[in-house]
Image (cartoon, grey):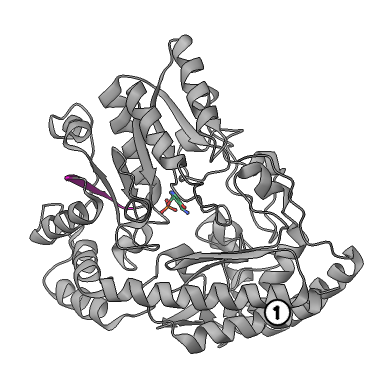
Amino acid sequence: MTGQATVSLQLDPRRLHTLIQREEWTLDNATQRSAELYRRGRQALSGGVASSFQVRRPWPIYLADGRGPAVWDVDGHRRLDFHNGFGAMVHGHAHPVIGRVVGERYARGTHFAAPTEDAIVVGEELARRWGLPRWRYTNSGSESTMDAIRIARGFTGREVVLKAIGSYHGHHDAVLAPGTTGSDQAGGAAPWGGAAAPGAGGTPAAVARLTVAVPFNDAEAMERAIACLDRQSSKPACVILEPAMMLGMILPEPGYLEAVREITRRHGVVLIFDEVKTGLAIGAAGATGRYGVRPDLVTLAKALGAGMPCGAVGGSEDVMSVVEDGSVYQVGTFNGNALAMAAARASLLEVLTPGAYQHLERLSQRMTGGCQRTLDRHGLPGYALGTGARGCVTLAASRITDHVTFQAAQNPELSKLIWLYYMNRGVFATPARPEQWTLSIAHADAEVDAYLAVHAALLAELAP
Ligand code: PMP
C-alpha cells in the first residue's frame, strides 16, 4: 500500500510562527550556560558538537547528568528523557546493575583486544534471541551495517546493495548514496534547524551507483528492481531493511516481510535486517522476534552496549562462513571490548529481561492510548503508534506506509514547535523527529503521564 493521500494538520503559518518565537525565546533564556559553552565549544569542535546529529541553532543544549528516567542540562534543568540517546538508553540512565558491572570490570582492566568469556556469553544470548548462530562485534550501528554489507558482498561475489528509500543505516558510503536516504528528496535541512539526515557529500559517485533504493512496504517494487538489476548482470548482493522502519514509525504491512524473505531467498540475495534501532528496544529479539521473519544477517548497536559504544552482526552459519574462513575481513581494535561486553552481558541477562519488555509494552500502551485520546478529543488528524520502547505520534489523516507518505505529512515548522514545546515543559525529546519517543525501563506511569500532560497542552494550543 503506497502513495496514498496524506493530509497533515493544517495550521495558520502566522500562528505557528508566533508560537515558535514564544517558545524559542523561553528556551534561549533558560539555556544561557549552553550558549556560553557553545561559544567556547565551537572553537574546538566543528559546530560546537561531537556529531552533526547534535547540531542545533542558535546553540545545542549541553547535558551534564542523567539518572533513571531524567537528564539535567548544564543550566540545571531536569527533563524526563524520551530521547534516550537516540534509543540506546532503554535501561534508563545510570542503571545500578550496569554501573556495578562496569565498575568491577574497570578494576580488572577494560581493554585487551583479546577475546573474553563475556563476549561468548553475549553471543550465545544473541544467538538464542535471534535464532542466528554466529556473531561478531563492532563499535556502532554504522560499523555493523558496513560489515554486514561487506559480508553479503563477499558471500555472493556481487556488489549492488538494495535498500528502502528514506531508510537510514549509518554514515558510510554504501548507505548514504544520494537519492536513497530520503533527506535529499526532502530538500535538505532537518525540521529542527540542524543538519539534515546526513548529506552524501564526500561519497564517491562510483560507490553511490552501487546502491539502489525501492519504496518500503512494496514487495512487488523490490521484486521488479531485483529482476531488472539481474537483467543488467548486476543482481544485488543484499537487501538491507529496517523491518519496522523508524522514519517516524512505519510498521511493515501484513505479509510484507514474509514476501521480502521469499523474494530474496528465491533470488539468492542476502537479507539483512538492520535492527540497530529496533533490536532490544521493541522486544527481546527486536523486530525479528516480533514479526517472526528471520533474515540471513542482523545488525545491532544502540541498546546492546547499555550506554557503552557497541554493535554486533549476527548471521546464519552459511553467510558468516566468509568471516570464519577469512575471505571477508571483520576486524577492529575495540571489537568485543571488555567493558562493553561486560555491560552487554549484564544488560541482556539481568536488565533487559522478559519482565522489562512487559513493563515497556504496558507503558507504550499508556503512551499511545493517552496520545490518541487527546488527538480524538480535539478532532485532530493523527494517530499514535508504539511497539516496546519506541513510539510515535503522526499528525496525518491517513497511515504513513513509506517514505512518500511520510514526506507528504511533514511540516518542519510544526516539528520545530513540538520539540521546543516539550523542552520548555520538562521533556527531553528527540530533536530530528520530535514526535518520536524511546521509553526506558526507568520510566513509570508518572513519567508517561507527565509526557501526556505536555502533549495535551500542546494539542490544546494547536486545535482550531
Ligand atoms: N542503522 C539504523 C537503523 C540507525 O537508526 C542508525 C543510527 N540512528 C544506524 C544504523 C547507525 O548507527 P550509529 O549512529 O551507531 O552509527
User: Foreground residue, 275 or 208?
Assistant: 275
Q: Is residue 428 left or right of residue 290?
A: right
Q: Where does the image place residue 56, in percent across and percent down from the top left?
A: 65, 63
What type of secondary structure mainly makes up the magenta span? Answer: strand
Label 1 crowd (10 A; few <14 / some 14-19 / many >=20):
some
Residue at (53, 44) in percent of width and height:
167
State the image quarter where residue 107 is shown.
Answer: bottom left
Residue 202 position, x and y percent, is: 55, 34
**Residue 173 in view in this figure:** no
Total numbered badges shown on the rendered structure: 1
**Residue under numbered circle 1:** 27
In front here: 369 or 40? 369
Residue 359 image position (x, y, % from top left): 37, 77
Q: What residue type is disc 1 on?
A: Leu
Taking the magenta stretch, the answer to whether it contains residue 137 is yes
Q: Quadrant of the C terminus?
A: bottom right
Location of residue 213 by image quarter: top right
Q: Looking at the image, which is closer to me, 293 or 421?
A: 293
- Is 403 placed above or below 161 here? below
Q: Which residues are magenta?
A: 133-139
Q: Is residue 330 above or below residue 114?
A: above
Residue 65 inside the magenta-drawn segment: no
- The secondary element bearing badge 1 is classed as helix
Instruction: Indicate the quadrant where residue 296 lies.
Output: top left
Q: Is residue 24 above or below residue 137?
A: below
Q: Is residue 16 found left or right of 197 in the rendered image?
A: right
Residue 409 drawn at (x, y percent): 72, 53
- Does any portion of residue 267 appear in the rendered image? yes
> Which residue is painted at 48% across and 73% down in the image?
364
Residue at 76% in and 69% down:
380
The vertical placement of 235 against 420, above or below, is above
